[in-house]
Amino acid sequence: MLERIGLERMEDLARTIPEKLRLKQLNVPSGLSELELKRLFFKEAKKNWSTLDYPSYLGAGAYDHFIPSVVEHMTGRGEFYTSYTPYQAEASQGLLQAIFEYQTMIAELTGLDVANASLYDGASSAAEAALMALSLQEGRRKILVSKTVHPSYRRVLRTYLSAQSVEIIELPYDPLDGRTDLKALENSLTEEVACCLIQNPNFFGSIEEVESIGKMLHAKGALFISIVYPISLGLLASPGEYGADIACGEGQSLGNRLLLGGPYLGFFAARREYLRKMPGRIVGQTHDTGGKRGFVLTLQTREQHIRREKATSNICTNEGLCALTAAVYLAALGKSGIQEVADQNLQKSHYLATRISKLHGYHLRFRAPFFNEFVVETKKGFSLLEKRLMQKGILGPLSLREFYPELKDCLLFCVTEIKTKAMLDELVKGLAL
Amino acid sequence: MRPLIFEIGSPGRKGYSLPSLDVPRKEASSFIPSRFLRRTLPELPEVSELDVVRHYVSLSKKNFSVDANFYPLGSCTMKYNPKVNEDVIKQPGYLNLHPYQKEETLQGVLEILYDLEKLLCDIVGVDEFCLQPAAGAQGEFTGLLIMHAYHTERGNPRRKILVPDSSHGTNPASAALCGYEVVQVKSNARGRVDLEELRRLVDQNVAGMMLTNPNTLGLFEDEVLEIAKIIHGVGGLLYYDGANLNPLLGMARPGDMGFDIVHVNTHKTFSTPHGGGGPGAGPVGVKKVLSKYLPTPRIVKEKDKGTLRIKNDFPRSIGKLNAFYGNVGVLLRAYAYIRSLGKEGLLKTGRHAILNANYLLKGLEGHYEVAYPEMCMHEFVLSASRQKEKGVRALDIAKRLIDFGIHPPTIYFPLVVPEAVMIEPTESESRQTLDYFIEVMKRIAKEAEENPALFHEAPVSAPVHRLDEVWAARNPVVKWEKKTRDEAPVATYSA
């Protein structure tokens, strides 16, 4: 092959690189065989505590749900995971159809009209929602965000908006309810506010007064962005039902692994009138020259590869495979499954909450209704408690000290359907010591 | 076509099982006031596990993939994704880790991520890396925010970002997201940045320049040191778009060329699967002076015992891009790839990427116009201008390739070449595959001469013929509606 292109030695392949830029040698260690690589990964894995071996009560945006075997068997097909973004529709009908179905499922779950093909994760999808609201609401340069929104999401929002001239106003929470302070919302709500971000259930697990919030926002012409936990939507009112304009959030809970925080899946849905302002890829239905149904990436003139600096977002690569995962998961669960999973989360978390609240030295911090996460206050001292639970082989709960200094003695518990009564009782025993 | 998943199944069917509830059950409304509960159920499929399997297996067959097809997709680096990289992470010690676990319970995975940062520093020639950005575009955004923070701290945030006219669309889009005005720099007759024009455009208001090297024409920017001098001369920073890093592996490093900020696309250069459009990862590396601005959290090693910590306390940091630490599952695969290849393998990869591209270029010149006829790096750009005279456009050639089991190359990009066909074979492909591609492309060139009408039907072998994209954009149907269930085709059981 070298000869064919008129070269003699492999070294000559560097010919177009100026000599002084050519590298002598990398410091990367020499290569490993397949067996050596497996040993290395096996050895490092053993140093980690998996939630399979150590039951975890951690939630806060990353949830340990049951994943039916069928999910990874489907997404593990090379035809899906080694394919490229489906720009060439005729060579990508399988993936395009699967994403069209995913969009439908997200629209159904959120009760909104349209959904995109995915964004990076829950935090960045919330930031993209805020950017979209700003572009829809020309002239309005204030954004409200409740302090009950995940602290990391708020940090990401600030980062995304750091180069824009936008004022971000954080709304305090009611110290008894652990919900957005509606009085404070009313006071901050002016004609300059483009949108308000509310998480439901919020970071504390509390269910917000979403319907009232929606009415207040719309009365002032502000858009309502609701950040939701999709599993909860098997039970809780959908953003569409309570009048949200945009629903977004973390789709990891839909069949994706915890994997130390990623890859996850930002989902994004909105009312139909905002379709052409949405960020990210969108799959649309069409037909071929013979009139047969087919699917394509559509409304591409919103996107960076066409519109460049005028695009609605800079996103290109998204989380396609994670969206496919969510679709297969939701297909396997179906209409009744999403309700059953949500119900088991509700029942088991309330069982645990009731048991803990009866223990001496513990009480539920907030009185608002919750889904599968709740905050407990205790003076027992977190580091001691954590150590004791770890000795029993239990991970979590999450201390709120770093996130909310005023809640330094508070712990956030999460219970999903994978916990058994025996595990919950064991945790209670550990806490009682 | 396969019916939609909503069009198969029947009421009550489901494809999973859960243990029955083992705690006493109460009505949901006894926990949550009914005004907070859902009134209409989501219209999700009602299918069995076998229905699910048949459905998705059938869809998977209607898709091109690297596992099944040659993908000469320029600037996308569709290399083979080694199977061992998928296997090594499939153990509970990686899959089932919660991001808020205590660091003591995560030492193994943190060790890998920490080491990956060091390896990437060596490969691209910078001082520190942050693994958090979830894809190239987010890496660009991160890099530009770092630039913004750097200049702001020096008293003038500056307004402009320079990009070559051949740049990727994400470059100007990311710059706009950072509030910058985008200024395009023309290419010269050699397909490189025009230095005269660059000198004319730079001033104290230029925050920096974004550059891909090799550029999107597959040419090495051989005056990159001079470019760096010009940008640094006005106090600006030079940003490396890592989309085309593959041919430089082991051969040259962006850091040595004067780049201050570098992102890499693990889903291109480091073999992590594209996943049908993601997830990827876009780690960002910087020179020492910029490291304090990197996003948080960062992984740090404690001096005494060597324990790894996840630290948030960096007051000058630009902030955070994702809720947690980025696409860890993707990063672990990239680490597996780098460790498998080692320094020798990385060099071989860079060389073979260049060899394969030039082999194709040689085989195709004479049959198609070559935009810049000289030795290329990992990719090159043809122009279908000759074929267009017969009424066959780049798009037609792309669609015709599907009939030969080859994924179309990137077309109509870069914008500076009319009827552009951008070809990147990657190092993965054998000589036989490359020869097959050359033969097919020659045949298509001949067909364009002799029977241009043939192209209007192409592809003929795909599950669908040419799709009407204009109709789709004018009448957006982006969701299945239940009412169409009755009108839908009857479910068939053929693939």
Image (cartoon, grey):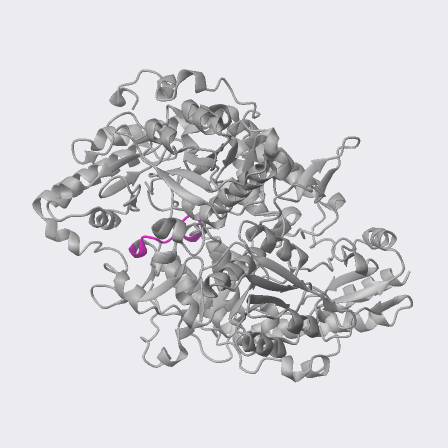
The C terminus of chain B, quarter of image = bottom left
Q: Is residue B24 left or right of residue B177?
A: right
Across and down, in percent, residue A69 comes to 55, 60
Across and down, in percent, residue B280 comes to 49, 46
Across and down, in percent, residue B435 comes to 25, 34
Res. B446 in view? yes
Q: Is residue A85 magenta?
A: yes
At 42% from the left and 34% from the top, the residue drawn is B211
Res. B171 in view? no
Count the numbered circles shown: 0
Highlighted magenta segment, given as a residue range: A80-90
Judge whether B61 appears above or below B348 on screen: below
Judge whether B113 appears above or below A120 on screen: above
Q: Is residue A62 left or right of residue A31?
A: right
Q: Name the image quarter holding residue B197.
A: top left
Judge whether A419 appears above or below B146 on screen: below
At 56% from the left and 40% from the top, the residue drawn is B146
At 38% from the left and 41% from the top, the residue drawn is B183
Q: Is residue B336 magenta?
A: no
Determine the main secondary structure of the stretch shown in magenta: loop
- Given residues A422 and B228, the one toward you in this image is B228
Q: Is residue A125 left or right of residue A397?
A: left
- Given residues B266 and B335, the one toward you in this image is B266
- Given residues A239 and B335, the one toward you in this image is A239
Across and down, in percent, residue B324 comes to 63, 51
Looking at the image, the residue that sits furthest to the left is B450
